[in-house]
């Protein structure tokens, strides 16, 4: 999750997100993924409308 902050190239972030959300189904990880998702939603709500925002929100 530490690398899902824009520090790696976009396609790699997509791959990491797929791994993160496709695995780690235990309660402790679900809680962390929920917090991460909430932060992402809040971050994208603050951005002006753009194609990258639409893509990110869709993910």
Image (cartoon, rainbow, N blue to C red):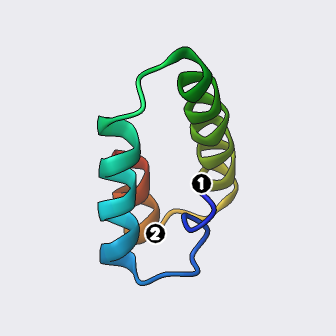
Could you tell me which secondary element the residue under label 1 belongs to?
A: helix
Give residue 29's position: percent from left, percent from top: 56, 29
Compare marks 1 and 2 and give the one earlier in the sequence.
1
Number of marks present in the image shown? 2
Looking at the image, which residue sits at the far top? Answer: 27
Tell me which residue sits at (63%, 62%) in the image.
2
Q: Position of residue 39 (x, y in %)?
A: 68, 44
Rendering coords of residue 20 (x, y %): 41, 45
Q: Nearer the viewer, residue 24 or 8?
A: 24
Q: CA distance from mark 1 to mark 2?
A: 10 Å
Question: In the visual, does 4 lie left or right of 9?
Answer: right
Mark 1, other Cα within 10 Å: few <14 / some 14–19 / many ≥20:
some
Name the residue: 57% across, 55% down: 1
| Residue under label 1 | 44
Give the residue at x 41% y 23%. 25
Corner quadrant of residue 38: top right
Q: Vertically, is 35 above or below 17?
A: above
Q: Quadrant of residue 11?
A: bottom left
Q: Position of residue 51 (x, y in %)?
A: 37, 69
- Categorize mark 2 by other alpha carbons within 10 Å: few (<14), some (14-19), many (20+): few
**Looking at the image, residue 11 lies above or below residue 32:** below
Which residue is label 2 attached to? Answer: 50
Task: Check contact, mark 1 vs mark 2: CB within 8 A.
Answer: no
Q: Nearer the viewer, residue 8 or 52?
A: 8
Q: Report the side of 23 relative to 57 (left or right).
A: left
Find numbered disc 2 in the image and state the secondary structure of the residue it sits on. loop
The quadrant where residue 16 appears: bottom left
Q: Nearer the viewer, mark 1 or mark 2?
A: 1
> Which labelled disc corresponds to residue 1?
none
């Amino acid at each position: 999750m530490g690398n899902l902050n824009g520090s790696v190239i976009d396609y790699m972030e997509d791959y990491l997100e797929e791994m993160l959300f496709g695995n780690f189904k235990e309660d402790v990880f679900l809680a962390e993924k929920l917090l991460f998702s909430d932060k992402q939603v809040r971050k994208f709500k603050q951005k002006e409308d753009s194609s990258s925002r639409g893509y990110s929100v869709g993910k």
